[in-house]
Amino acid sequence: MKVEFTIARRLFGHRDDQRRISRPAVTIAVWGVAVGLAVMILSVCIILGFKGEIQSKVIGFGSHVQIINYQSLYTAEPQPVAVDSSLLHRLADLPGVAHVQRFATKTGMLKTDEAFKGISLRGAAEEYDTTFLSRHLVAGCLPRFSSDTTYNEIAISRLISSELGLEVGDRVFAYFFSENVRARRYHIVGIYETHLTEFDNNWVFTDLYAVQRLAGWESDQCTGAELLVSDFSQLENTTAEVASVMNRTQDQYSSTYSTHHIKELYPGIFSWLSLLDTNVYVILALMIGLSLFTMTAGLLIIILERTNFIAIMKSLGSTNGQLRTVFLYFATLLIGRGLLIGNLLGIGLALIQQQFGLVHLDPASYYVDVVPIALSWPLILLLNVVTLIITVLVLIIPTFLVSRIEPARVMRFE
């Protein structure tokens, strides 16, 4: 094998005849592999980034796991369930649970002199993880979240702000309907924007105590508890663990607990995200096909152009197998050059987009304002290895052309 590789390397580095027909073919083959790999890297990074961005936003609104009243699944208005401090600690001690927080929701309407808007008022307590909201805050600050005091502060989305003509510092009336109409006047302290229309169009954040009073619930009652898991890949296992403890149990008000993870609560969004994988598979297949086509064509041209070399080597005693190995090594060196260029091109463009966000999107259609990038080095390495293996295996076929070249016939024509 050392002899075959040495010959292939000498052929690969041979530059004495720049007029060879194979030069453009080699260049096209190398760039075919390079462009194919670069497109595959960018496609994977963009899809991973897009899925991660959308997924993180949905989880930011709804957490990983929710424990709610079983009756809330069948009613328009959420039903309360008791979540006291002892239950919070009990849930936090379960395996895989990283954080636990209470929440309460109440549907209502914001009204100004010129317009009105239906909303879902979402109350949070002092243990609420504000990381997500803080990252998407575009003006002002977050409301003061509390379970025992109301500050009449709210944070609205930029979408609601634009529709109602409201800004930070304004005061607005909100109306809530049950047996009777309740009116509250809130102070807008913050504006957030996530570009997820389904949520931005409805959700308004305030303190937990305000929603409890509006709903007429006890101090230990709320819509439910939200759990953040330490490992999202173990979401279903952690949910099953929580469900085994909570499901079919009742609180002191005879309300039954029910446990659901985020994929069950928003199946449409996660089904849509899973469909994006199909797009990636199609792109990968097309790009690998491009690499195979250019490399096969290039290798055939190289073999045909070197019939003299093949004839001489056969005359000196080289076997067909040895010569096929030489050209296979030669093709592998070409593929390696293409992979190197493709990595530099694909990873370089991905890093530029990740750092500077040069390519923008319409957030109304794509839910993000710039093309998101998520670099996964194991996947990039896997793309390189798979491309190399598939291409080399397929190129075994054109090397059999070597067997059809007869030294006597070549020498006679020469």
Image: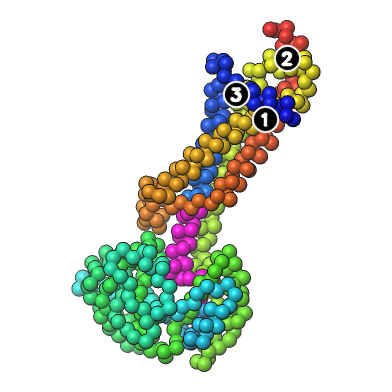
Determine which of the numbered discs, if any, sits on residue 329 in the image.
1
Q: Residue at x 55, y 74 (%)?
A: 97
Left or right of 346: which side holds 143?
A: left
Q: Quadrant of the rendered structure where residue 151 is?
A: bottom left
Q: Give the residues drawn in magenta, as a range.
A: 47-66
How many labels sit on residues?
A: 3
Indicate which disc residue 301 carries: none
Q: CA distance from mark 3 to mark 1?
A: 13 Å
SS at circle 3: loop
- Which residue lies under the disc numbered 2? 312
Q: Which numbered tag is attached to residue 13?
A: 3
Task: Give the quadrant of the C terminus.
Answer: top right
Determine whether 342 is above or below 131 in the image. above
Dot 3 alpha-carbon crowd within 10 angstroms: few under 14, some 14 to 19, many 20 or more = few
Foreground label between 2 and 3: 3
Amino acid beneath label 2 = Ile
Instruction: Give the mark nearest the N terminus, 3 or 1.
Output: 3
